[in-house]
Amino acid sequence: MSGHSKFANIKHKKEKNDAAKGKIFTIIGREIAVAVKEGGPDPANNFKLAQVIAKAKANNMPNDTIDRGIKKAAGDGNAVNYEHVTYEGYGPNGIAIIVEALTDNKNRTAANVRSAFTKGNGSIGTQGCVSFMFDEKGQIIIDKEECAMGADDLMMVALDAGAEDFSEEDDSFEILTAPEDFDAVYKALQESKVEMAGAEVTMIPQNYVTLTDETAVKNLNKTLDMLDEDDDVQAVYHNWEE
């Protein structure tokens, strides 16, 4: 594997998430509502909902909160209608950034995202301008300290369930799947009592870029922080090697 630690990034995200868990639960709740509206309340027949539930559990969202969100979305005909929107652009030094949002006001969200790019000395691009640099994959991260299973046994469970790749770092294991195989691999690990530090379908950069200029790093962090604070933004992907 490359030198950057995906688990370190997961831990960094979790630390930020833990400091604002209410916001994270709100974001996931919105994703649950949209998934239920689009495909129904049964995760066995709604792949998108199954993905969101996996993400919710990886973020320690209580089961009763997940269940309430599903029931509310299934029975609330007057719920706010959210739309999926995706923005692509460049941060300082050409860092590729993808922003996914759920919004009830596309004009507001577009203005906020554009402002975040501009204030960090970046720019919004056209659809497809950077997404070709990423691969959509199911990604499961396992903390070695929390895993009782050996590497070989864990790899076999993952590969037998349909995983594409298994790799090991000093502090963690990473499992990659095709998006459509994510749910099966996740369930197989659950059944094997494997604790997962992170589990979601995500966009993984094909290559990472290092920034050495302090001003560029400061500007990029400004953009990422502004996007992180925006309630409409669900996920941000980039190819900066932090």
Image (cartoon, grey):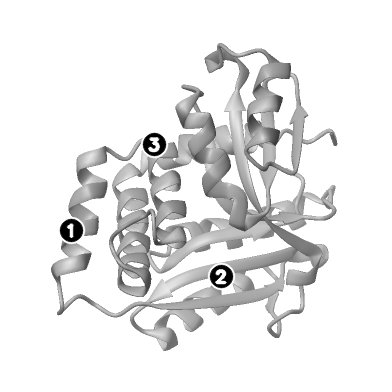
**Which quarter of the rendering shows the C terminus?**
top right
> Dividing the picture into quarters, in which one does residue 75 lie?
bottom left
In the rendered structure, are the residues bearing label 1 and label 3 in contact, judged by CB atoms less than 8 Å apart?
no
Q: Position of residue 157 (x, y in %)?
A: 63, 28
Q: Position of residue 196 (x, y in %)?
A: 51, 30
Q: Residues under labels 1 and 3: Cα distance?
A: 26 Å
What amino acid does circle 1 point to?
A: Lys
Q: Disc 3 on helix, strand or loop?
A: helix
Amino acid under label 2? Ala
Q: Position of residue 108 (x, y in %)?
A: 40, 83
Residue 166 vs residue 58, the one in the foreground: 166
Q: Which residue is mark 1?
A: 71
Residue at (20, 66) in percent of width and height: 74
Q: Nearer the viewer, residue 154 or 1?
A: 154
- In this rendering, position of residue 120 left or right of residue 35: right
What residue did someone put label 2 on? 116
Q: Is residue 159 above or below residue 23?
A: above
Label 1 and label 2: CA atoms lie apart by 35 Å
Q: In the image, is 230 to the left or to the right of 176?
A: left
Residue lying farthest to the bottom in this orientation: 107
Residue 2 is tagged as none
Secondary structure state at the residue bearing disc 2: helix
For mark 3, what is the residue?
18
> Is the residue marked by circle 2 packed among few (<14), some (14-19), or many (20+) residues within 10 Å?
many
- Seen at 66% across and 12% down, the residue is 150
Contact, mark 1 vs mark 2 (Cβ under 8 Å): no
Q: Is residue 94 above or below residue 165?
A: below
